[in-house]
Image (spheres, helix red, strand yellow):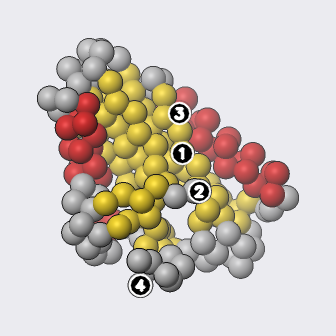
Amino acid sequence: MMTETPNMYCLVRGSAEGRTRLNAFDKALLNAGVGDTNLMRMSSILPPAAQQVDIGDIELPKGGLIPLAYATIDGNTPGRLISAAVAVGIPEDDSLPGVIMEYEDHADLDTVEGIVRQMVIDGFDYRNRELKEIKSYGIEHRINTCGAVFAAAVLWYK
């Protein structure tokens, strides 16, 4: 059980085709670098002063319980566009937490990222918190037969 507050995060994304929607989702997780872990979906708060790292810079334990905030969408309509994105809002005051927002839709990535970035702005507005920076990361995929996309903010600690 994780008892330490995470002090780092990484943004990941993946897309894939599969024989079934679940297989497509599983392959998208592998593509994102988190496929051999157990995802623990969390509410969307970035711990104070958390530092961004690349997924390759941390060693997630195989089968481990990994906290993350994520967006995902899948489908089996050939030719349909699907997109998922996450955005992280970094506060001016690094003693305060930031926010992570997630969004997915049957739309192009520019639209999905625009919506998720606005969600961060809104989250900071109603918290009366000064926003320093927004980092967003997403992916789009046009379904061939059965596809999935996945975008996440993974929290971890060292």
Identify the image quadrant of residue 80: top left
Whether residue 110 is visible here, answered yes or no, is no
Image vertical order of residue 141 relative to residue 133, above or below: above
Q: Quadrant of the N terminus?
A: bottom left
Residue found at x 61% / y 62%: 45
Numbered label attached to residue 102: 1
- Tag 2: residue type? Ser
Looking at marks 1 and 3 on the same chain, the residue that comes earlier in the sequence is marked by 1
Quarter of the picture holding the C terminus? bottom left
Quarter occupied by residue 82: top left
Foreground residue among 9 and 109: 9
Q: Nearer the viewer, mark 2 or mark 4?
A: 2
* Label disc, if present, on residue 112 of the rendered structure: 3
**Who's the residue at 22% across and 51% down the image?**
30
> Is the residue marked by circle 3 packed among few (<14), some (14-19), or many (20+) residues within 10 Å?
many
The local secondary structure at tag 4 comes to loop
Q: Give SS at disc 2.
A: loop
Amino acid under disc 4: Lys
Kindly identify the amino acid type of the residue bearing the numbered disc 3. Answer: Val
Q: Which residue is mark 4?
A: 158
Disc nearer the start of the sequence (4/3): 3
Can you see residue 141?
yes
Q: Which residue is mark 2?
A: 44
Disc 4: CA contacts within 10 A as few (<14), some (14-19) or many (>=20): few
Q: Does dot 3 land on a helix, a strand or a loop?
A: helix
Q: Residue at x 61, y 77 (%)?
A: 49
Q: Earlier in the sequence, mark 3 or mark 2?
A: 2
Question: Label 1 vs label 4: CA separation?
Answer: 25 Å
Contact? badges 1 and 2 (CB < 8 Å): yes
Measured in 3D between alpha carbons, the distance from the residue under mark 3 to the one under mark 2, in whole angstroms, is 17 Å
Q: Is residue 127 left or right of residue 156?
A: right
In the displayed structure, would residue 29 be above or below residue 56?
A: above
